[in-house]
Image (spheres, rainbow, N blue to C red):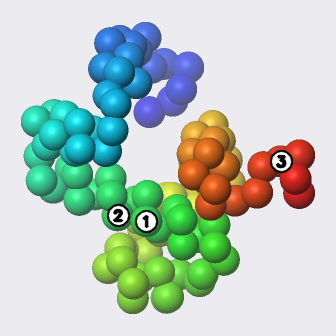
Amino acid sequence: MNKRNRKPRNEDMYKAILALRDVDECIKFFDDLCTVSELQAMEQRFQVAVLLEQGLIYNEILEQTGASSATISRVNRSLQYGNDGYSVVFERLGLIPKKDEQ
């Protein structure tokens, strides 16, 4: 969907996520919010993003995650041309160095 034509976001869900205190609460919330398939897809995309950031090639990522080449490509586009959401999380989790440390 074109970003300019997107409906305004309801921020309530995002505020709810920020209110969660630990991984256990987060897992419970997402288990209630999402289907098993939706969770598996999101977890797989995140794993693919981490592996791409680590420099793995598509075949290695496919082998480790079972993700399709279309999914790997989609995640790669988000890493390259997205809103830097992955970068923020990677930096805060210590998966990549902070920009001022590079």
For the point 43% across and 75% down, the residue is: 69
**Residue at which label 2 appears:** 44
Give the Cα separation between the discs numbered 2 and 1.
Answer: 5 Å
Q: Which mark is residue 67?
A: none
Depth check: 59 or 87 in front?
87
Give the Cα separation between the discs numbered 3 and 2.
Answer: 26 Å
Name the kind of residue labelled 3 in the image. Lys
- Would residue 9 appear left or right of 37 to someone viewing this image? right
For the point 43% across and 65% down, the residue is: 47
- Would residue 49 appear left or right of 90 to someone viewing this image? left
- Would residue 67 appear left or right of 27 to someone viewing this image? right
**Residue at which label 3 appears:** 99
Element on which disc 1 rests: helix
Q: Is residue 2 above or below residue 85?
A: above
Q: Is residue 5 above or below residue 49?
A: above
Element on which disc 3 rests: helix
Marks 3 and 1: CB-CB under 8 Å?
no
Q: Report if residue 82 is visible in the image.
A: no
Q: Residues within 10 Å of mark 2 (few under 14, many from 20)?
A: some
For the point 50% across and 88% down, the residue is: 60
Residue 94 in percent (x, y) is at 64, 56
Indicate the quadrant containing the C terminus: top left, top right, bottom left or bottom right.
Answer: bottom right
- Closer mark to the observer between disc 3 and disc 1: 3
* Mark closest to the chain's N terminus, 3 or 2: 2
Indicate the quadrant containing the N terminus: top left, top right, bottom left or bottom right.
Answer: top left
Residue 17 in percent (x, y) is at 34, 27
Q: Which of the 4 image quadrants contains residue 63?
A: bottom left
Element on which disc 2 rests: helix
Marks 2 and 1: CB-CB under 8 Å?
yes
**Residue at which label 1 appears:** 47
